[in-house]
Amino acid sequence: MQALFARSAALSLLLLAGPSCVLWGQSPTGSPAAGAVVTEHPLAVRSGLSVLEAGGNAADAAVATALTLSVVLPRAGNLGGGGFALWVPKEGEPRAVDFREVAPSGTDPRAYFNGEDEVVSSRSLRGPMAVGVPGTPAGLWHLYREYGSGRFSFRELAADAIRLAEEGFPVDPWLARSLNSTSLREKMNSAARAIFYPEGEGLVEGDLLVQSDLAETLQLYARRGPRAIYEGEIAEAIVKELRRTPVPAAEAGTPADGFFQIELEDLSSYEALERMATRVRFRGWEVLGMPPPSSGGLVIGQVMGILEGFPLSEERVPRERGGYAPTPRLIHWWIEAMRHAFADRAEHMGDPGPKNDKVPVGELLSDARIAAARVAIGERADLEVGPWGMELPQESDETTHLSVLDSAGNAVSLTTTLNTSFGSCILVEGAGFLLNNEMDDFAVTAGVANTYGLVGSDANVPARGKRPLSSMSPTVIRDGDGEVRVVIGAPGGPRIITAVTQVLLRLLLLEQGLVEAVAAPRLHQQWRPMSTRFEGGWDPAVIDALEERGHPVSVEPKASFASVQAIRVLKRAGEGGEVERVVEVASDPRRGGAGGIQGQSVSEPSRPK
Ligand code: GLY
């Protein structure tokens, strides 16, 4: 039975115009009052909502939203990248869908070095050796086939994306800013420039971006499924495009047997995989996360597990406006818990392998290990934590995320990426989509420790068929009745993990509102570097108190960490004693995303500052 909407919704919407919206509703059936979609482009929100409104479930809507992102958010939405999705049904087991890119069969880490045994970092960012075998075409198809409602053809779910690619859409200020800043134009290949820089000039806000080749690719994909991309003309176009792309700094010579790139067999053998979601408990909530090759579920799980055993309620101060503020001691614990978990990330996490036995997931989330980390946390910052001598790969800010909840209570949390903004900047001529540079998420130096004197595990060294370690953290929270209460995720490299954790702590521990929790200033601690980074907006007294506890800090007033896309369902007693459910969405004001709830308008995205 569809929910009855209380008309006080109008007032809430007026009060909360901007990056969020709220629905007040009743749902005597035990389901949320209505479905909701939140992601980094309002046109993609619209695609997801129209599927929900036509009777689709969360998986259908997530697929439609992701396909539209592949058209309207070219910096991160994609067909040529990969990602992860958590499917959390109202009834039954949650599933983690892994459509991460795969290293090509010819992968040889030595090819990233020059004749002087120096890493040529541009080779994992640009050129053919930057590109992993894309996973998105298989992943979205898998989500549709396995978990979709069965009420729609894939073509119907792709209809919006195809139309927007074919007819064009107005360039938004965020896309215009990316295209017209820095040296992006120089990085793009000629096929990409022809689309984003017609007549040599970057598109500006309001220009129509038409992507006819992408429209045709989407048509083919919608008709024939992922084989249309992994085999035949499009697969051949990918291989051809890479073959004509120069290897950066190749003239310097290499000790490797040779360079490598994706070949036809790499594409035809790609498969999306199903994995078990990570699960931890935090103050009675169930936290479901993405297992390796993402580090998100494990790091968030460890942080929340470590914190769970501290007397958290004693370190939060009630506020007049409701909810609590954290004390500096509580923030000290957050930071130290993150330091421990990120040290484990660096040492132990990578591709779990075909038998899921290469990352000690059970041990990393075990009570004993988590208790040991907690016991090791004292009243001062401990900068000695972790495996010394290891170097971490740089991770970019890009990627994108969508959260979907349907009115039956099923949820999808899906994060997808090309890695850096616009990926490798190699657009497949004739096919109209950009290829990722996900090979940069491997730690090239870890496997050659002797050459550089670096110590480290080989958990994340590039090798044929391996999936690079990721920070993408699609996350879902269920309550003690097994109902989905939060659907959340973000782009932002390792800042994804810390941003998602902090929003969850503000919601579940500090009982703050969703909009406030998403907008609140963030900090970031990832073990290396040792200092903790702070966005602007923190109380200087908190920073001083942390410094007194020995924390190196870096206050960065202009920094912006991640872009959280979240849905929450609140439960409260209605006037007649029945349970009332309130659905809220919040798209991070740090970027130009939007949220929408079935039957209501889509929120207005923020503009770049
Ligand atoms: N490429 C960013 C990530 O996977 O974390």
Image (tube, rainbow, N blue to C red):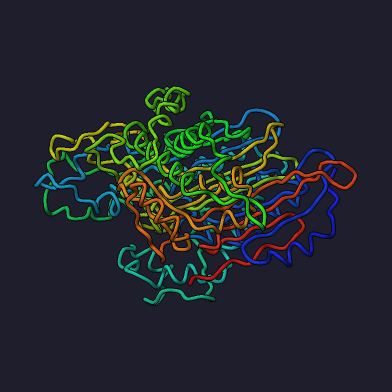
Give me the residue at 42% from left, 25% from top.
Answer: 369
Where residue 148 appears, as percent x and y from the top left, is 66, 39
Q: How many marks?
A: 0
Question: Along the line of sight, which residue is nearer the eye, 566 or 255?
Answer: 566
Give me the residue at 75% from left, 49% from top.
Answer: 582
Q: Is residue 66 visible?
A: no
327 on left or right of 5 = left
The residue furthest right is 576
Question: Along the line of sight, which residue is nearer the eye, 228 or 585?
Answer: 585
Question: Along the line of sight, which residue is nearer the eye, 119 or 328?
Answer: 328
Q: Does residue 214 lie above or below 463 as drawn?
A: below
**Image quadrant in which the N terminus is located:** top right
Where residue 350 appears, as percent x and y from the top left, is 36, 34
Which quadrant of the view contains residue 339? Answer: top left
51 on left or right of 105 = right
Q: Does residue 318 lie above or below 295 as drawn?
A: below
Where residue 15 appears, as percent x and y from the top left, is 72, 66
Which quadrant of the view contains residue 478? Answer: top right
Q: Is residue 323 visible?
A: yes
110 on left or right of 194 = left
The residue furthest left is 116
Where residue 53 appears, as percent x and y from the top left, is 75, 52
Question: Along the line of sight, which residue is nearer the eye, 172 or 263?
Answer: 172
